[in-house]
Image (cartoon, rainbow, N blue to C red):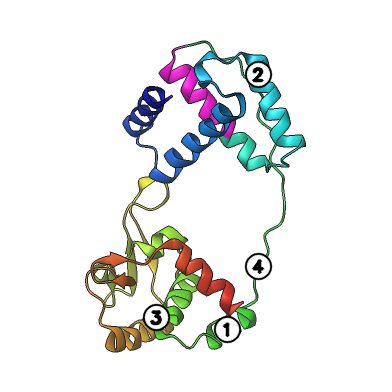
Amino acid sequence: MKTLRNKMIQQMQLKAYSQGTIQTYISNLVQLSRYFGKSPEVLSVEQLRDFLHHMITERKVSRSWTNQFVSALKILFCDVLKREWNPLDIPRVRGEKKLPVVLSRNEVGQIIKVTTNPKHQAILMLTYSSGLRLSEVRNLKIADIDSQRMQIKVVQGKGFKDRYSILSPVALEMLRQYWLKCRPGTWLFETAPGKPICQRSVQLLFHKAL
């Protein structure tokens, strides 16, 4: 399994998969291997279907998990083991269509207001006003904030693409207050000198504010 795992990781790295996706797909295959006590390469299609059925009916995994697992299997069998892949044998599940829960402007204002930490306030305001993803906020550097053009440079965002987002006057003022009090180094939001804040910390401060 170790050799197979290394080949799988190498293949995904060659295809420029994100580190998060690589970890998720490897975790999927480790679960499969532990369930049968065998390496995935020796399992039959029926065994793969039985495992997936077990995870869906007994473990109540999400549709997202199911499709991630199918994607991991496809990479393993098509790209690594060079075997034929029939999508009808192990089908993906249809995604649910739900309307997103959107906070009102007043609700967002309350969330920011109850947050007293200057850094946390700046994170929440910047995320909301600029429409940034969690990973994008985490990876911002001070040099990415352009107060002259009132914009933010997002480096290697979703799809490994650079883009620009808006910088609101209110967010800029919060960033200035935060910078004067905390004086971060390279990264805009740090947990320690030279180390960007982790995504889990941002999630926790948001839920605490909620």
The circle on residue 47 is 2
Q: CA distance from mark 4 to mark 1?
A: 13 Å
**Secondary structure state at the residue bearing disc 4:** loop
**Secondary structure state at the residue bearing disc 1:** helix
Which residue appears at 29% of the width and 77% of the height? 147
Q: Inspect the image, locate mark 1, and give the three-letter code of the amino acid beneath it.
A: Gly
- Label 1: which residue? 109
The magenta-colored residue range is 69-82
Q: Inspect the image, locate mark 3, and give the three-letter code of the amino acid beneath it.
A: Lys
- Please indicate, yes or no, whether residue 73 appears anywhere in the rendered image: yes
Taking the image as shown, residue 157 lies to the left or right of residue 202, namely left
Which residue appears at 27% of the width and 68% of the height? 187
Is 81 situated above or below 156?
Answer: above
Q: CA distance from mark 3 to mark 2?
A: 50 Å
Query: Which comes before the other along the chain, label 3 or label 4?
Result: 4
Q: CA distance from mark 3 to mark 1?
A: 16 Å
The front one of 80 and 59 is 59
The front one of 172 and 19 is 19
- Label 4: which residue? 102
Query: Which comes before the other along the chain, label 3 or label 1?
Result: 1
Q: Inspect the image, locate mark 4, and give the three-letter code of the amino acid beneath it.
A: Val
Residue 116 percent across, percent down from the top left: 48, 88
Whether residue 72 is in magenta: the answer is yes
Q: Nearer the viewer, mark 1 or mark 2?
A: 2
Residue 137 percent across, percent down from the top left: 40, 65
Residue 100 percent across, percent down from the top left: 67, 59
